[in-house]
Amino acid sequence: MAEHLSQSELDYPFKLLEYFNGFRVSKVIFSACELGVFDLLLGAPGPLSARHVAHELRTSVDGMERLLDALVGMEVLEVEPAEGTALYSSSDVANLYLARGSSKSLHHMMTYQNQTVYPLWTHLGDAVREGRNQNEKTFGLQPEDPFQAVYRSDDEMLKFMGLMDSSWILDGHDIATAFDLSCFQKIVDLGGCTGALAREMAKAYPSSSVSVLDLPTVVDAAKKYFSRENDDVVFHSGDFFLGDVPPADLYVLARIVHDWPEEKCLSLLRKLHDTCRPGGGVLLVEAMLLETRRGPLMAQIFSLNMLVQMEGRERPPSGYTRLLNDAGFHDVQVCRTGKSYDAILAVR
């Protein structure tokens, strides 16, 4: 039964134990973000004791010391002894990605994962049994309209927008440059949320005009909370499922197709095919599965998240190719970026 296992795997299942404890590791970082640990250490003139951190953040000293030690064990923080007291400081990784003040901060992503995604995943077993999202059990909202949960309050909408904004800090440049898109003079990012990916596109293709179409409430919040200095991205208000879409040479659908059932996606893609002129195209941005079903693990986890939270799924390249062909697009090209999200380009 265990003939394919090495002796070390037979003696101790390191990988399994790492997976078993994964949720605890996540919670350590989530809790530190929520409490403000990384912001405090970034702004401190030097290393701080657990007692000092606990006093500033109004926590117990014992609890904070244990949290800081765990972050040191994860190599997120640094520690040094000083006259019998441990002094803690941030690592470069924490300062760059976890402190709120950094231009590359993923704080919004951590907040959304902790306060929205984590509660949903406590019902993963139910989602697998029932084959539907768990918004009703988690938030008291009917599963038929998953975006009711995403936008159930202004605070929740802003958390979601912060998540989307953070995503393109890591992946935006790779997506914008996955293909040479300079032949497309007018680019519209449908459901572009805060405009973060559109800004990366505008930087990569300065001779093209890049705009965002999203719901009116999202556009208003994007302009109020996520605007950038000297921002050249134009926002349009509308519903790309129900209303018209602005004319464009290239439509970008980033993390849109994976949200919805196949028929709804196909209907949208057919609308885009009929709207764009010959030679125009569509760029899908998704976490692609392997055709062999052997990974990538993160894309497989994202697909489970679509089950728990939305109505869609992640797909391998063949799944997106079939959808695009059925909608009338051809010359489908696939680019795996090596990051969380990949790109699929097709033309009319």
Image: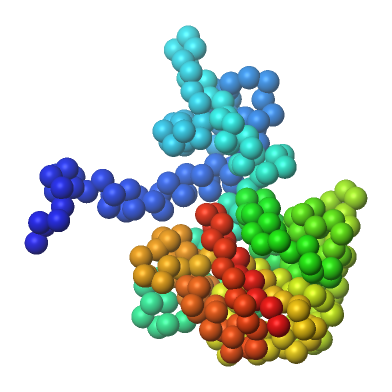
- Give percent across and percent down for residue 100: 68, 42
- Give percent across and percent down for residue 282: 69, 75
- Give percent across and percent down for residue 15: 29, 49
Q: Residue furthest top?
A: 83
Residue found 68% across the figure and 44% down from its top = 104
Q: State the image quarter where residue 304 is shown.
A: bottom left
Which of the image's four quarters has the C terminus? bottom right
Front residue (pair 347, 4):
347
Residue found 46% across the figure and 15% down from its top = 81
Task: Tell me, yes or no, if residue 190 can be seen here.
Answer: no
Front residue (pair 322, 190):
322
Is residue 332 rendered to the left or right of residue 223? left
Against 95, residue 200 (above or below) is below
Is residue 97 rendered to the left or right of residue 1? right
Against 266, residue 256 (above or below) is above
Residue found 87% across the figure and 54% down from its top = 231
What colour scheme has been applied to the protein in the rendered image? rainbow
Task: Tell me, yes or no, if residue 6 can be seen here.
Answer: yes
Which of the image's four quarters has the N terminus? bottom left
Q: State the image quarter where residue 339 is shown.
A: bottom right
- Give percent across and percent down for residue 203: 80, 53
Tally of numbered discs: 0
Residue found 70% across the figure and 39% down from its top = 102
